[in-house]
Image: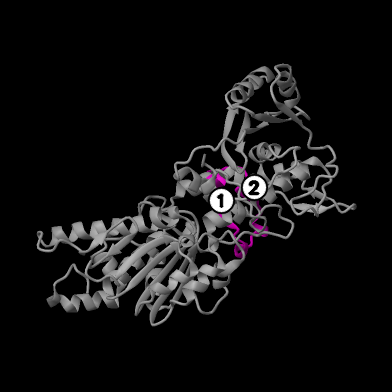
């Protein structure tokens, strides 16, 4: 039984066990929207539940509430929280659980004038023990890769709940291990942002075994009310700002609307007028909770970029330092109609950062590049010299700086991809494909990229095809600019850093990036 209530209150305890929504309100003091309430009830009564969600829609919050209901109302019980990274499990799921635990304790102490201290037990960094004298009754969170497949067998219990957050990023062997636990009164929950159209989490949405939910940001109470109803959830202003930014949506005629594809109407800001919009893949996944419309000709899938963002976050949160790799500085010089230039700082498989500078004359840009190169031993700048960058590179060469003239239109010669099978029509195709190889999980791609929306859009926008000679061509930049509504500056700055040296494949993980 829950430690918050005396044995004489067994009727109240039974009412909570019968209705987790009541327990979440009465004890955990959480406020759920209607969609979250349906999810919590599903986890209570259904063996398997899968949730895909847009950004900041509360999927992890409702999963944490379910975890706290299960572990506090069923004894003995075990709750396992897992995911691809410590950030997702400890910093988000466990943190939400601990906040609910603290809020419940404070409420119970206040309600009973200190007669009861709260839920009881102890909450550590990764684990809740409702009763320290009952070692088989706990809530535990850990990164999936920290536990070997054979270790999962030690978590059997008459009552068990397993919650996998960001489930798209978990390997099949993790799900195989979890399946061995799902006996007796068991529950399995998957929560994910829909970026990857393969794997166990993707198949769950097609399986009759799972009760399925989609958390659409546009249906959040905060968005519908145009004010904050539930603190912490996505709000109207965030979505409205995305719609105004280039590359997120495309204005279409009402006759072209197809709601099944995510097309929607939104205020234009002109009186009571509404416009019709078609979402980009990034808008589909981050806002609508829909899978991307990736085709076979898409150069870089969104899921690969999202995985690289997690590697970058893991490196930053580890407190590691750079390990001595030379800086490759990609410089996208501002051209006609642009008021900013973009610098990409890449150290082997780590892109430390991007910088945007106000447009300046060639000498000013060359000065900024030279100052960066002078502070990084062995560094090299890569500048597109077909256009505005020619003068910048010439000045750097005059100053004896290590600067490489990038000519994307040149032939790629005998340069091939990492598999040694593909050839390219020009250096632009070679460099873009080199970024693809550095992200491809099948090639052990370990490139770590900062989570920048413009970069994500730039990398996921291009398509590719073979020319008549069987060599790879990348979609023309003019077409990409039309699709994005702007120039792909971040993507260009990154791809320049892969020119024209032979790509060296580096094995390892982000955890090794900062050692040394």
- Frontmost residue, 235 versus 24: 24
For label 2, the residue is 506
Query: Residue 327 occupies which quadrant of the picture?
Result: top right
The quadrant of the rendering that contains the N terminus is bottom left
For label 1, the residue is 509
The residue segment tinted magenta is 242-269
Q: Is residue 481 left or right of residue 68?
A: right
Disc 2 to disc 1, how far (Cα)?
Answer: 9 Å
Task: Categorize mark 1 by other alpha carbons within 10 Å: few (<14), some (14-19), many (20+).
Answer: some
- Frontmost residue, 159 versus 42: 159
Q: Position of residue 202 (x, y in %)?
A: 57, 68
Task: Categorize mark 2 by other alpha carbons within 10 Å: few (<14), some (14-19), many (20+).
Answer: few
Q: Within the magenta stretch, is there residue 366?
A: no
Residue at left 16%, top 70%? Answer: 5
Query: Residue 31 occupies which quadrant of the picture?
Result: bottom left
Q: 274 above or below 382?
A: below
Residue at left 9%, top 63%? Answer: 115
Q: Secondary structure at mark 1?
A: loop
Residue at left 71%, top 52%? Answer: 299
Q: Within the magenta stretch, is there residue 266?
A: yes
Q: Position of residue 408 (x, y in %)?
A: 78, 37
Residue at left 24%, top 71%? Answer: 134
């Amino acid at each position: 039984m829950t430690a918050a209530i005396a044995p004489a209150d067994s009727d109240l305890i039974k009412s909570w066990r019968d209705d987790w929504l009541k327990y979440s309100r009465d004890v955990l003091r959480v406020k759920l929207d209607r969609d979250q309430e349906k999810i919590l009830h599903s986890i209570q009564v259904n063996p398997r539940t899968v949730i895909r969600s847009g950004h900041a829609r509360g999927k992890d919050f409702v999963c944490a509430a379910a975890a706290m209901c299960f572990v506090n109302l069923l004894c003995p019980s075990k709750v396992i929280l897992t995911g691809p990274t410590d950030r997702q499990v400890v910093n988000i799921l466990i943190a939400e659980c601990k906040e609910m635990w603290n809020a419940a304790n404070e409420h119970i102490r206040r309600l009973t004038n200190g007669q009861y201290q709260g839920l009881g037990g102890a909450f550590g960094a990764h684990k809740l023990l409702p009763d320290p004298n009952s070692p088989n009754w706990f809530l535990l969170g850990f990164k999936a890769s920290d536990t070997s497949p054979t270790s999962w067998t030690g978590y059997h219990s008459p009552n068990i709940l397993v919650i996998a957050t960001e489930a798209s990023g978990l390997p099949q062997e993790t799900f195989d291990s979890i399946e061995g636990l799902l006996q007796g009164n068991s529950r399995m929950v998957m929560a994910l942002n829909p970026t990857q159209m393969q794997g166990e989490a993707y198949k769950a949405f097609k399986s009759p075994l799972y009760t399925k939910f989609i958390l659409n940001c546009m249906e959040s109470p905060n968005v519908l009310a145009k004010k904050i109803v539930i603190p912490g959830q996505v709000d109207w202003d965030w979505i409205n700002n995305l719609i105004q930014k280039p590359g997120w949506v495309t204005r279409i005629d009402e006759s072209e609307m197809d709601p099944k594809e995510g097309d929607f109407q939104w205020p234009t800001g002109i009186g009571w007028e509404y416009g019709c919009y078609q979402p980009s893949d990034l808008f589909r996944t981050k806002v609508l909770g829909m899978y991307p419309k990736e085709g076979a000709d898409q150069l870089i899938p969104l899921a690969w970029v999202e995985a690289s963002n997690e590697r970058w976050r893991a490196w930053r949160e580890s407190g590691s330092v750079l390990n001595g790799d030379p800086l490759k500085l990609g410089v996208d010089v501002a051209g006609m109609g642009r008021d900013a230039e973009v610098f990409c700082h890449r150290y082997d498989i780590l892109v430390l950062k991007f910088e945007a500078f106000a447009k300046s004359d060639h000498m000013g840009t060359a000065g900024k590049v030279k100052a960066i190169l002078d502070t990084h031993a062995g560094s090299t700048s890569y500048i597109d010299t077909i256009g505005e960058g020619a003068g910048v590179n010439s000045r750097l060469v005059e100053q004896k700086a290590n600067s490489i003239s990038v000519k994307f239109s040149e032939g790629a010669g005998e340069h091939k991809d990492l598999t040694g099978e593909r050839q390219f029509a020009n250096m632009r195709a070679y460099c873009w494909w080199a970024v693809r190889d550095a992200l491809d999980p099948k090639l052990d791609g370990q490139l770590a990229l900062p989570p920048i929306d413009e970069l994500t859009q730039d990398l996921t926008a291009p398509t590719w095809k073979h020319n008549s000679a069987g060599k790879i061509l990348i979609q023309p930049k003019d077409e990409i600019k039309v699709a994005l509504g702007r120039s792909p500056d971040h993507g260009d700055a990154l791809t320049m850093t892969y020119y024209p040296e032979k790509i060296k494949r580096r094995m390892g993980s982000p955890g090794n990036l900062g050692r040394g």
